[in-house]
Image (tube, rainbow, N blue to C red):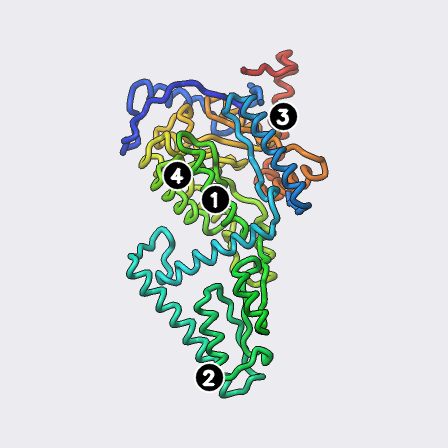
Amino acid sequence: MTRVLTTSASRCYSSNVKKYECTSAEHKKELDECYNQLDLSFENTKKAFKVSTTYFYEGEEQCDKNRDIFKDSINAVASATGNEGFVAVKVTALGRPQLLLKLSEAIVQTQNFFKALTGGMTLQEGRLTAQEFTKRLIATTEMYESCLTRIADEVDRRGRTNVSVMVASHNEDTVRFAVNLMKERCIAPSERVMCMAQLYGMCDQVSFSLGQAGFSVYKYLPYGPVEEVLPYLSRRALENGSVYNKTRGNVFNTYQAYLKQTLQNMEADMQVARREGWHFGAKLVRGAYMEQERARAQAIGYEDPVNPDFQATTKMYESCLTRIADEVDRRGRTNVSVMVASHNEDTVRFAVNLMKERCIAPSERVMCMAQLYGMCDQVSFSLGQAGFSVYKYLPYGPVEEVLPYLSRRALENGSVLKKANKERDLLWKELKRRISSGEFKAKTHS
């Protein structure tokens, strides 16, 4: 992704600003100039500016090639833009998808376990002392064992062909309890009354020992929606941020507003960055695979992770932006930044008005905008003319892989298609202007 415009105005603000007001006459002048210049109708096309998939696993050798391509791309953008450009990397091309699913499953299970211990509290809300944690952990273990004992009682009551249970646990003590309970009740492994299950690739020593002794053991590989790999990807982005965002925002994690848990997940990541003292960087998008997620949830029968409608997604997007602006006020403007990746004009207006309300100048680089190259140029150019930092995504690769990607972007951005007539009219207007003025080639700004 190549940067459209670079601003060089100096920063002028106080990191302790509590009210949204300018901190100097110079700051106020800059704000007035850029916000008064911006046409929020996004219909001014007079000036142009110089603009600098679904993954199928093909083996580790191909993953190594993908890694080298990513490294070359990052180096090329850094060299061409003076370390100011961005590269969007889909890390799913760097490893086996099943591994991402397994690791994401482990993270989600840990989060759910924490909720169970705290009575439904989230990671942000829950605060447990070591004593409270131990007490609740014991209570949870006792509940699990009580359920197993009750099932064994039911086996004695109804017979061994009418009751069965799968002990799905990675806890060795729980597995030992189940084995000892079977031994106490004289239940042979061959009777298939109790079987064991662990996640594929986890607790293999437990699974192997049980299997060697003749117990029925199942290893399951989680197969689920695209959003189930996000916990691991987000975790990796968070870890990279803690390493490379010490002094500035080099790594931006992507947050998808179409998911119901986006604000909560972003809040957790912001707390980590604040606690560890590094720059929090976020790229906020409406989201990919929305229709695919909803259809799969309905077909399989799990809770729909997607916001119910376009309005709810818009509200989530705006809530995330507002929360980031609050974090900027709290931590200072050199410690938080966000890329507003949107083709929706109303969303861009919301971001611009939020910056204006919080007295955030474009030169402070707290918020930047991004659109796909060739889409919504009337938005990009209007922002660029007013001094905002704007990036244009330029996806590249084999045609058979890039076209499906662009098709999905078009399908996911229905509002863009609805406004295609507007873009066509603006292009026609610009063409007539150039013909009448004799300006057949647009002037670019370096």
| Residue at 57% in and 19% down | 50
Amino acid at the residue labelled 1: Thr
Q: Is residue 411 left or right of residue 129?
A: right
Label 3 – label 2 distance at C-alpha: 76 Å
50 and 127: which is toward the camera: 127
Instruction: Residue 109 in the image: state x and y as whole percent.
Output: 47, 58
Report the Cα–Cα distance between label 3 and label 4. 35 Å
**SS at mark 4 in the image:** helix
Q: Mark 1 = which residue?
A: 314
Label 4 Cα crowd, 10 Å radius (few <14 / some 14-19 / many 20+): many
Q: Which mark, by number, is residue 324?
A: 4
Choose mark 3 or mark 1, whichever is in front.
Answer: 1
Residue 339, relative to residue 104: is it above or below? above
The kind of residue on which mark 3 rests is Leu
- For residue 350, say whether it is visible: no
Residue denoted by label 2 = 153
Distance Cα–Cα, label 3 vs label 1: 28 Å
Instruction: Using a 10 Å C-alpha cutoff, classify the residue at mark 2 as few (fewer than 14 neighbours), some (14 to 19) or many (20 or more).
Output: few
Mark 3, residue position: 427
Q: Nearer the viewer, mark 3 or mark 4?
A: 4
Q: Give whichever of discs 4 and 2 has the lower sequence position.
A: 2
Q: Quadrant of the C terminus?
A: top right
337 and 24: which is toward the camera? 337
Marks 1/2: CA–CA distance: 52 Å
Instruction: Of the two numbered discs 4 and 1 on the same chain, state the one appearing first in sequence.
Output: 1
Q: Quadrant of the N terminus?
A: top right
Which label's residue is closer to the chain start, 3 or 1? 1
Numbered tag placed on residue 47 in the rendering: none
